Amino acid sequence: MRLLHRQKGAIPYMLLAPGMAWLLVFFVVPMWYLAKMSLSSGLFPLFNFGWAWGNFHDAISLYKPQFVRSGQYAAIATAIALVVSYPLAYWIAFRGGRWKNLFLLLVIAPFFVTYLIRTLAWQTILSDNGVIVKTLQHVGILGSDGRLLATSAAVIAGITYNFLPFMVLPLYVSLEQVDQRLIEAAEDLYASKPRAFMRVTLPLSLPGVFAGVLLTFIPAAGDFINAQLLGTPRQYMIGNVIQSEFLAVRDYPTAAALSFVLMAAILVLVLVFARILGTERLTVSHV
Amino acid sequence: MRWVRRHVLTAYAVLALAYLFLPIAVVVAFSFNNPKGRFNFTWSGFTWKNWENPFAFPGIGPALRVSIELALLSSLIATVLGTLIALALVRYRFRGSATTNMLIFIPMTTPEVVMGASLLTLFVNWRIAQGFGTILIAHILFNISYVVVTVRARLVGFDRHLEEAAMDLGANEWVTFLRVTLPLIMPGILAAGLLAFALSIDDFVITYFNAGATTTFPLFVWGAARVATPPQINVIGTAIFVVAVTGMLANILFQNYRARKGAVLA
């Protein structure tokens, strides 16, 4: 009996062991090596660990514009993605009926075309001879030699598009869970439709907003493909720097330091955001 | 007024979906293009020839093959490892479950460049030559978390009375698992496997850091994009898209059919 009990206690660990070992060896250990690398000095392939905190100072002072740009682009793209996605997710959740899954598939389907090919397609769409540029020039929004490609607008548009499902799906999940009877109750109590939305639906969907913003902002801030394919070095983000420092320059210590600054910056922003959203939710429910 | 708002929202949803499909339409259309130069950016006439010879451009066939092999292997292994973790997390209370949850969650919130870079640092430190093996390791790694999350969602909504019924009828734990639990969570496992396959075949960033001389399809596209964009890229992209969407569509129709049949039976 006692033996049986002990065996039962071991089962979860046996189930966990192979997968968690993988995560430990190939996620935690690499992070530790990356941390060590960020405090090393030397030239490829010989780096020596030695508490070289200067790497962090150099990384921040040299690449501040790229850091700031990454934050700005990611924030703008996330905001646009939220505005574009919310009504779509709302429509699928409340008006989709039996075809909800089909509409969800329609949302995800475009992302089965390889990321790079999608982005190359935006290169075609935004190109100087494309319909969009010609139309904007005709209407006068763009000058006669104005372009979209190789501008910040193009990079932000690309980022917005490429991470859209990360926004739509969490929003849909939280909106789908909203109890319709609560909205009906609000309306029975003479709340107007917009008021019922502001006071009931929106607050209840905030977890989805939080998850969506997080899942969009993080990959957006670390992205380098959109800046590379739709922009110029003047639009380069911190991802471009990390990528070239690792793979072209091979200055691993600087690149490692940049990686940690990026992670720390994202973590701080996420915590601040969680705080803002959290307190807002509290105030809404107390009014 | 109600009518107007209802339709404004519908019109908006249609527009949003059109926006999502605009680049896909371009990809499909340009797979039939007959470009004059090396770049496939301006329309210059319809042709079937890209579809007749999808592997005509050197290197594209082997790259696709590597991608498919990686996606199959990594999704298979990650689905097994991830399903076991999900079972442990949902079914058992044990010391360290909070840490486990955290370790599952963090990789999903780590920017891809950072994950790719950390693996590169590991392989350099351990003097492991980069190639197919290192890409496979990386793909399994980023897939595990997604599998756990997907399978766990299915397990949480699981009716445990069914298992108790099986045990009451004399089945032991192992038989119950094989005959009751596994078939019931199979749709979740399949969905997780498909997701892992899709993430693997599409991954560029982490692969780019750890590929060595091996070329996957996305790496091929990246390399090609500097000097030329053969329309064959669009052909393969369209083909992957059609296969994936057909598979998912079939899955949805089947679930709908089963749900309706189930409703009739009940």
Image: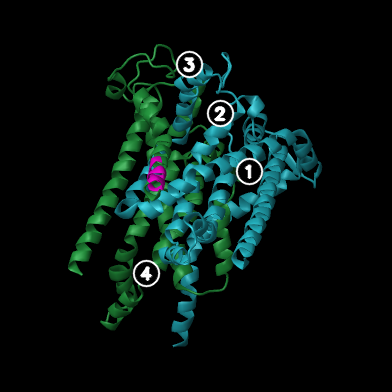
Tell me, yes or no, whether the highlighted magenta stretch contains residue A181.
no
- Residue type (three-letter) at the residue carrying disc 3: Asn
Secondary structure category for the residue under label 3: loop
Report the disc number at residue B215.
none
What hue represents chain A? cyan
Visible residue check, residue B76:
no
Mark 3–mark 1 distance (CA, rounded to whole Å): 43 Å
Left or right: residue A145 versus residue B7 is right
Residue at image mark 2: A154
Task: Indicate whether A223 appears above or below B27.
Answer: below
Residue at image mark 1: B121
- Residue type (three-letter) at the residue carrying disc 2: Ala
Residue at (36% x, 59% y) in the render: B188
Tell me, yes or no, whether the highlighted magenta stretch contains residue B9.
yes
Residue at image mark 4: B158
- Residue type (three-letter) at the residue carrying disc 4: Phe
- Foreground tag (4 vs 2): 2
